[in-house]
């Protein structure tokens, strides 16, 4: 849909679903509680085997939802393919992505839409989240932007201020997103639909890191981001999360998800023109993905020393002079030679 055909001020909520019928009641209630009421819901069923459609239809009637709600089924292709389908059906000037297992707070859409309406130079605004364990209700992270009682690095970037809103005005914003992330979650964002025109999500290999990569490509196309240092979302951890954040995620799942993320960052350097600072940040990010995430935190911790060594070597290719990596690599080689690495049994027990 062209920009001229979009409905002004309408926010299209795009919700990909895969076997999430049990979450729909709370999801629809959270959407219905939004103080910005000019919205439509585009639900994309990504090949569910449960009764998603029947549950949706029943809840729309039961809850008395009067806004437009549309249902679209597709064969299972992953969440980003589902979001692309949603984008093709969305009619609004703005889009917001809702993950059915999370909960928006009532002010989310209103704050986001009004910020975009007020600031013509702002294209994408996002906010903070609180992370909880779904099974216990226990808060795991109170404020993602301030996790472990530390301000996230992006909060130190130069920004134009308007009350709670901060609009990035810093040449280092792309490098910061590459190296340490802007904490820019899709489910905490409200975005102008034009950002996606001609530029859908990369969905060919189900890269769960696409939500980190897409803002980089958007900023390199000239779109501007801003944020609220304010909680807009309750992010809920559970066993069926699609990312490595899933409780009890297996080693195989962690390796699959991180392999796709590493591939995405490798391809980023071919997709956009990076400055020298951004290229250096990319090399450091790739070193981290391979050495620390895949090699040390997954393979070595799971008692897989040979696989860990392969990942260490991949990471060291990007930052061969990193002293901490070199020392860790040497220490792991020594422990491998004498048979002192974490046992797979211990790692398996820790992940279950």
Image: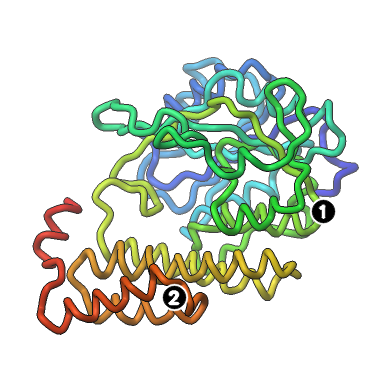
The percent coordinates of residue 228 (x first, y second) are 64, 29
| Image-based side of 139 in relation to 159, left or right | left
Crowding near pointer 2: few (<14 within 10 Å), some, many (20+)?
many
Question: Does residue 174 appear in this view?
Answer: yes
Residue ranking furthest to the right: 4
* Residue located 17% across and 76% down the image: 335
* Residue located 71% across and 37% down the image: 226
The percent coordinates of residue 158 (x first, y second) are 73, 40
| Rendered image: mark on residue 315 | 2
Q: Of the two numbered discs 1 and 2 on the same chain, state the one appearing first in sequence.
A: 1
Which SS class for mark 1? loop
Q: Mark 1 or 2, which is nearer the eye? A: 2
Which SS class for mark 2? helix
Mark 1 vs mark 2, CA separation in Å: 31 Å
In-front residue for pair 118/52: 118
In-front residue for pair 47/92: 92
Q: Which residue is mark 1?
A: 222
């Amino acid at each position: 849909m062209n920009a001229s055909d979009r409905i002004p001020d309408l926010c299209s909520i795009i919700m990909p679903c895969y076997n999430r019928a049990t979450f729909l009641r709370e999801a629809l209630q959270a959407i219905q509680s939004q103080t910005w009421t000019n919205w439509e819901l585009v639900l994309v069923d990504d090949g569910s085997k449960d009764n998603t459609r029947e549950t949706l239809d029943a809840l729309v009637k039961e809850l008395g939802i009067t806004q437009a709600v549309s249902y679209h089924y597709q064969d299972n292709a992953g969440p980003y393919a589902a979001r692309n389908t949603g984008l093709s059906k969305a009619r609004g000037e703005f889009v917001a992505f809702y993950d059915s297992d999370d909960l928006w707070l009532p002010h989310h859409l209103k704050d986001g839409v009004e910020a975009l309406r007020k600031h013509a130079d702002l294209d994408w605004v996002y906010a903070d989240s609180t992370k909880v364990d779904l099974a216990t209700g226990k808060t795991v992270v109170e404020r993602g932007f301030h996790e472990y009682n530390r301000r996230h690095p992006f909060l130190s970037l130069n920004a134009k201020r308007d009350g709670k809103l901060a609009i990035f005005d810093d040449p280092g914003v792309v490098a910061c997103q590459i190296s340490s992330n802007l904490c820019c979650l899709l489910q905490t964002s409200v975005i102008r639909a034009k950002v996606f025109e001609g530029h859908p999500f990369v969905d060919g290999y189900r890269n769960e890191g696409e939500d980190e990569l897409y803002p980089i490509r958007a900023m390199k196309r000239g779109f501007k981001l801003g944020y609220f240092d304010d909680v807009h979302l309750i992010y809920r951890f559970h066993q069926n999360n699609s990312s490595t954040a899933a409780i009890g995620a297996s080693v195989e799942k962690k390796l699959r998800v991180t392999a796709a993320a590493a591939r995405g960052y490798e391809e980023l350097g071919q997709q956009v023109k990076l400055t020298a600072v951004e290229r250096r940040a990319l090399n450091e990010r790739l070193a981290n993905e391979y050495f620390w995430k895949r090699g040390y935190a997954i393979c070595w911790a799971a008692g897989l020393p040979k696989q860990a060594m392969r990942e260490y070597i991949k990471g060291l290719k990007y930052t061969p002079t990193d002293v901490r990596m070199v020392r860790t690599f040497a220490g792991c080689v020594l422990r491998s030679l004498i048979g002192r690495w974490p046992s797979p049994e211990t790692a398996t027990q820790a992940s279950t």
